[in-house]
Image (cartoon, helix red, strand yellow):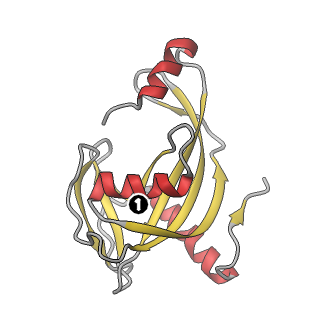
Amino acid sequence: MATPDFILALRKKIGHDPLWLVGVTAYVEDGAGRVLLGRRADTGEWALVYGINEPGEEPAATVVREVREETGVDVVPTDLVRVKAARELTVYANGDQTQYLDLMFTCRLAEGGCSEPRVADDESLAVGWFSLDELPEPLAASTRERFAALLAWREAGTSRALFSLG
């Protein structure tokens, strides 16, 4: 999986110093209530689709792009579930340090678009639809945490996003 050009350009200037990035997560359900997951090439774990917002790109457009790039599925974002800043730095094998602000969206399938998932890039080993009571393993801890956030959001009523205050 290629590092976006804008990050490579920033890294030339800041080296491995911490870099603040906006990311998005897509919770996509089909008509049967199954969730779209991909098995990540970097960890081997199953996870929700997520990715990095490009400079100037609307976050909802990032969701659409990332889901299409990773799974071939066409979606429409419907709701902002959560806005959450990572407390810890992520340190990559090459020494790069990053911290993320994650915007989690629910999505529905786009009318007339592709709904059959397929491995569409080098970020995924496999993709598919899964019932919430029959999730594949190993499931990423971050995806389990995001499922819990989605449940809390639904219990709170889907009219507002969840915000962390500390």
From this view, report whether residue 94 is shown above or below residue 82: above
Q: Secondary structure at mark 1?
A: loop
Q: Amino acid at mark 1?
A: Leu
Please state which of residues 166 and 100 is positioned toward the viewer in this rendering: 100
Give the residue displayed 50% in from the left and 40% down from the top: 54
Between 1 and 134, the one lying in front of the other is 1
User: Where is residue 7 drawn, in percent x and y?
Assistant: 48, 27
53 or 143, which lies in front?
53
Horizontal and vertical percent for residue 15? 53, 14
Residue 142 seen from this side: no
Crowd band around label 1 with a 10 angstrom C-alpha radius: few (<14), some (14–19), many (20+): many
Classify residue 15 as left or right of residue 85.
left
Q: Can you give x and y, in whole percent of width and height, for residue 149 in the image?
A: 59, 68
- At 37% from the left and 74% from the top, the residue drawn is 109
Residue occupied by mark 1? 48
Name which residue lies at 46% across and 60% down.
143
Q: Is residue 131 visible?
A: yes
Residue at 26% over, 59% down: 72
- The single residue placed furthest to the front in the displayed view is 112
Above or below residue 133? Residue 116 is above
Which image quarter: residue 159?
A: bottom right
* Picture quarter with the N terminus: top left
Q: Nearer the viewer, residue 65 or 132?
A: 65
Q: Relative to 106, is 17 on the left or the right?
A: right
Q: Which picture quadrant has residue 2?
A: top left
Q: Is residue 25 above or below residue 30?
A: above
Residue 119 appears at what percent x and percent y? Answer: 21, 55
Give the left or right position of residue 138, taking residue 150 as reference. left
Left or right, 18 with reference to 11: right
